[in-house]
Image (cartoon, helix red, strand yellow):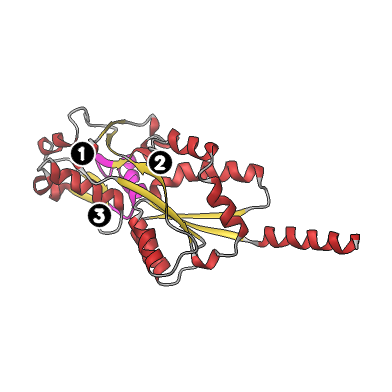
């Protein structure tokens, strides 16, 4: 009997180790999520978690078309909600953070805020593609709120996601960018330029949500990691990168 129990325990541990978790995550989470996963794995070394970053809209399309992801962390909770409506999720969509957009530059004065872009006709302005990136959509909304969008539209250059838009700014392909606070607080950008927060009243809130997808309904590691995201250590990391946290 003892041998049988031992074999069962070994089989359970092997099965837990074999359960890989593949996550599609919004690009604004690149640095925060890497830290969350690293901290989680320090206490759960058997966990095999892979995170692929990109725009939330592109990830939504891929998942809708059958891409084999286990979890989806979106910069807009509307995308997980749509997947839930389509019967593609194992859990209810959950709000995990609220993002912020900023004006950032390493060469230009950002103190006048986004409205000041109208006075810089020669500058190249980087934003994420608003067609499928929530941070790009909010950047567009903010420019329209301040009635400068039509004037600066010819100056815009579009990143495939918010990470690429930030890269344009770092490499000099753009003079200034409307970026995610979580990106500009990362070590790779924190000492490279200056930023100013963009007033939240100028755009719809960046309510970010995640969901466990249908293919992972029996994945114990995915469920455990989903719970960990709401833990204090994970929330502390998100807060460090400028995210506002739900109660």
Q: Which residue is mark 3?
A: 130
Q: Which residues are magenta?
A: 159-178
Q: For the residues marked 1 and 3, what is the alpha-carbon distance in whole angstroms?
A: 18 Å
Mark nearer the N terminus (1 vs 3): 3
Image mark count: 3
Quadrant of the image for the N terminus?
bottom right
Q: Nearer the viewer, residue 69 or 160?
A: 69
Residue 37 position within the rendered picture, expressed as x and y whole percent measured from the top left: 55, 46
**Which quadrant holds residue 84?**
bottom left
Q: Is residue 25 visible?
A: no
Vertically, is 92 above or below 232?
below
Mark nearer the N terminus (3 vs 2): 3
Vertically, is 229 above or below 120?
below
Q: Which residue is mark 2?
A: 246
Residue 67 position within the rendered picture, expressed as x and y whole percent measured from the top left: 46, 68
Dot 1: element: helix
**Which residue is at 36% across, 54% downward?**
77
Mark nearer the N terminus (1 vs 2): 1
Tag 1–tag 2 contact (CB < 8 Å): no
Name the disc covering residue 201, or none: 1
């Amino acid at each position: 009997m003892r041998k049988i129990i031992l074999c069962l325990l070994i089989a359970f541990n092997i099965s837990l180790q074999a359960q890989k978790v593949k996550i599609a995550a919004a690009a604004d989470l690149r640095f925060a999520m890497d830290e969350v996963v690293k901290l989680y794995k320090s206490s759960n070394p058997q966990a095999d978690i892979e995170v692929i970053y990109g725009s939330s809209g592109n990830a939504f399309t891929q998942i809708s078309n059958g891409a084999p992801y286990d979890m989806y962390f979106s910069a807009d909770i509307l995308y997980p909600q749509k997947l839930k409506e389509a019967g593609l999720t194992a859990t209810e969509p959950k709000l995990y953070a609220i993002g912020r957009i900023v004006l950032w530059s390493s060469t230009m004065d950002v103190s006048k805020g986004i409205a000041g872009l109208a006075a810089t006709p020669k500058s190249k302005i980087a934003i994420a593609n608003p067609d499928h990136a929530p941070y790009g959509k909010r950047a567009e909304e903010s420019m329209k709120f301040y009635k400068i969008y039509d004037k600066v539209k010819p100056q815009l250059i579009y990143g495939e996601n918010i990470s690429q838009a930030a890269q344009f700014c770092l490499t000099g392909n753009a003079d200034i960018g409307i970026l995610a606070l979580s990106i500009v607080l990362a070590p790779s950008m924190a000492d490279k330029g200056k930023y100013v927060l963009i007033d939240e009243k100028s755009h719809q809130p960046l309510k970010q949500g995640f969901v466990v997808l249908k293919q992972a309904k029996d994945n114990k590691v995915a469920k455990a990691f989903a719970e960990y995201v709401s833990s204090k250590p994970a929330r502390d990391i998100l807060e460090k990168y400028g995210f506002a946290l739900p109660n």
